[in-house]
Amino acid sequence: MGLMFVAPTIVEGNPTAKLDKNEIDRMNTSWENAIIVYVVGQNPTMTAMLGFIKAQWGLKSEPGVYKHDEGYFVVKMNSKEERNSVVYAGPHLFFGKPMIVKKWIATFDFHNEILKVVPIWVRLPNLSLNCWSENSLSRIGSLLGVPVYADECTTKTLRISFARIPVEIDVTKEILYEIAIEDPTGATFKQKVVYDWLPEFCKKCQVIGHNCEANTKAPAKWLKKWVPKKKIETVISKEQIPEEAQITLDEIEETNGDISHIVAPSMVVDACLGGGPAIVVETDMVNTPAVTPDHVPRMTEEEEPWKIVTRKSKGKHVAFHKNGTVNFSQLDSAKAWGARGPNPYLS
């Protein structure tokens, strides 16, 4: 469209652009079927909004959709009927997020119309049926804000448990949950107010959709603390060892060290060096020769028995006896006193 120079009008000494009323009325008529759409807490893309409108609103003709940098959409319908069918069908949800849908007006201001004054569906439970007229509902809704209309069930009295109307409410002010109503006789009664949805309003940012004060509290953090492992010592007394497992020194001397004929008893051993609980094992599972205490006469290097040793690691077993001597049976009589020569793993 071609533009031209139009001389400005001087108003109170300032040059002012004076608009033509006929042109403004013509443009208002072209946008009178438009609606404003804003998704609270989310900024959908144009593709996502087009897909939502096509799938959810079921319009006969495709509307014009325009996105503003402030985050709202202007949806231009092709008829007044299509506009009303969408506006009166609320409340709307955009994939679980609340959606504000309201008629476009010539004086629309995003910050005042959307971020502060929000159309909210209000329920009036147990409202007397003689208060369901257009005039009465308008007076009751005006206590909360600017009532817009009544839903179909309220208009046609298809549901009598509560009246339901959308009201444009200034969320920056106090939200009322109970209002006072006076009937023509002068009697006053309290009416409960239930909101289908209330947006979060941030007093710091003066916008809806979040609350900075609610997010100031830091979440609790888990602190890791190293606790030293307690050592549990297992003490085994002589009374805890079965009598058949107690082999005296006299029995060893009588057999000249040959104890292979003695039946293998069960022994109580410590589970690990770290102090695990005591367990009972069968000694025939161990092929380690006997260990003799210091008071037993020392034998030659070739005849000296092997001693039980373990590495200091988790899971290794240590067998012991109160008097310091532990004898195992089921040894090869021909090699009763072990291999000859030093062994680095024995002490």
Image: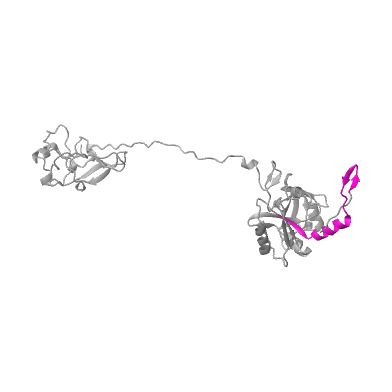
Q: Is residue 114 visible?
A: yes
Q: Pick whichever, 202 or 155, lies toward us.
A: 202
Highlighted magenta segment, given as a residue range: 8-37
Q: Residue at x 65, y 42 (%)?
A: 212
Which residue sits furthest top?
Answer: 295
Residue 264 position within the rendered picture, expressed as x and y whole percent measured from the top left: 17, 46
Viewer-nearest residue: 33 or 298: 33
Left or right placement of residue 3 versus residue 222 in this view: right
Decide which of 268, 334 is in the foreground and name it: 334
Tag count: 0
Query: Looking at the image, is 19 positioned above or below residue 247?
Result: below
Is residue 125 at least partly visible in the picture?
no
Q: Position of residue 211 (x, y in %)?
A: 66, 44
In the picture, residue 267 is in which quadrant? top left
Q: Quadrant of the N terminus?
A: bottom right
Q: Is residue 314 left or right of residue 291?
A: right
Q: Position of residue 120 (x, y in %)?
A: 72, 53
**x and y percentages locating residue 198 in the rendered image:** 68, 50
Q: Is residue 292 magenta?
A: no
> Which residue is located at x 66 percent, y 64 percent?
55
Residue 10 covered by magenta stretch: yes
Q: Quadrant of residue 73?
A: bottom right
Q: How is the image coloured?
A: one colour
Question: Is 328 placed left or right of 34 in the picture?
Answer: left
Q: Is residue 317 left or right of residue 135?
A: left
| Nearer to the camera, 178 or 26 | 26
- Residue drawn at x 78%, y 63% is 80
The C terminus lies in which quarter of the figure? top left
